Amino acid sequence: MTYAEALAFWYGRINYEVRAAGPGDLKLERMRALLRLAGDPHDRVRLVHVTGTKGKGSTCAMLAAVLRAAGYRVGLFTSPHLEHVEERVQVDGVNISRAELAARIAELAPAVRRLEAGGGPGVSFFEIGTALGFLHFWYRRCDLAVVEVGLGGRFDSTNVCTPLVSVVTNVGLDHTAQLGNTLEEIAYQKAGIVKRRVPVVSGVTQPGPRDVVRRVAAEAGAPLWEAQEDFGWDFDGRFATVATPSREYHGLAVGLLGAHQAANAALAVAAVERLRESGMPVPDAAVRRGLAEVRWPARVELVSRDPAVVLDTAHNVPSVEALVATLREAVPVSGRKAVVFAVSADKPYPEMLRVLAGYFDHLHLTRYGNNPRSVPPERLAAVLAEVAPGTASTAHPTGREAWAAARAAAGRDDLVCVTGSVFLAGELRAAVTGA
């Protein structure tokens, strides 16, 4: 296959990032069958498996950075991508190449066609991407791969692996159509990545969801470390302190903005401690270096300061709340604050708009691409008028027009933030960063 042929084959499958999945669409049998035909590459690589409502991507990036600093060859699987699909599969911080992607897709194609010839639902875009990641990590002889769940956990395509450590960052209301309408229901889906006798690191602190994670771990005989019980952290605005059952780390510099990133750093450090217990040496110096050097684009990414320009991907209420708190603390401005906002229809966007309206002076409402999941800007404007009457706003037909208007209106002491969706951040990243 050529690269173009490989992309056409891959994107020719049903994509639940474009069309929201229903509960019945999330199953593991097809994924297991695909991997079996591909030689079960997921069983040939040591893994850490990470899920959560927010922060899972940042936690994965931190953990991968620490392990690279320790000298390991580290795979990283995340989703969705910002600008290029190759971002989803990395080894030592480098995206899979076009030639490698084409070769791996060509290898998977016969298995995909064989499964689809048997009838039933076709293999999905994400399932192929997951198999591609496992296969690439095996071919590149990774010492360990950090794998981020795509949706939920229990029935996510990545949940065919048996990791060295399972991580649940937190639980919030998101993807309720697929995962449930209560925090406890969502916690049950997230905790589905827990495997028998595999150590678990959990950042879940709400009593109800925490009890669900505890029960699932106990039933699996999986040793559980919990935030605020077995490990904790503090953050003074510049440095984090993390305490685990075996040691304390003082004065940790974290390369990502926000107090919430200190919590993600604590999860990464706790996962490192669990890996040490499994026999993987990780020097303390690697922990410090990895956390300080980690970069994760579009996660409260401060692009410039004059005016302040921030690119972000907050796409649910907890993430938007964390964004606003971080901007107040880390990116204070004396001028006006504007946000460019687009969001998917399955997100709780009325509450997201309410949170944003409490901080920003002007909301530039738009949509991302031609994706049918994106809420029309006119709809956003109508909802904003209901949840935050009197808030200044402008509806724009495209993200680029919204960004251009917000940037043109910004003075040197102002702030412009782009947020609401990974898709919007990816669409505008080149324009925002000038790349």
Image (cartoon, rainbow, N blue to C red):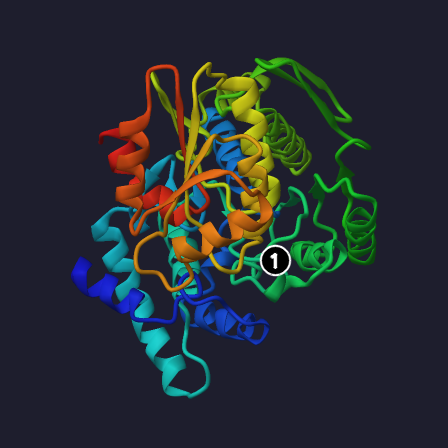
Tell me if mark 1 has few (under 14), some (14-19) or many (20+) residues whose alpha carbon lies within 10 angstroms of its own.
many
Q: Is residue 4 left or right of residue 112?
A: left
Query: Relative to residue 336, is residue 157 drawn left or right?
Result: right
Which is nearer the eye, 247 or 55? 55
Circle 1 residue: 153
The residue lying at 75 percent from left, 29 percent from top is: 231
Q: Of residues 139 and 260, which is closer to you in this image?
A: 260
Query: Regarding mark 1 in the picture, which secondary structure is present there?
Result: loop
Residue 238 at x, y = what percent? Answer: 57, 13
Note whether residue 91 is visible: yes
- Which quadrant of the rendered structure holds the C terminus? top left
Q: Residue at the spot x=64%, y=42% of the render?
A: 169
Q: Which amino acid, mark 1?
A: Gly
Q: Residue at x 23, y 66 (%)?
A: 8
When the figure is inspected, residue 21 is found, relative to residue 356, above or below; the finding is below
Tell me the residue at 62%/46% (across/down). Answer: 164
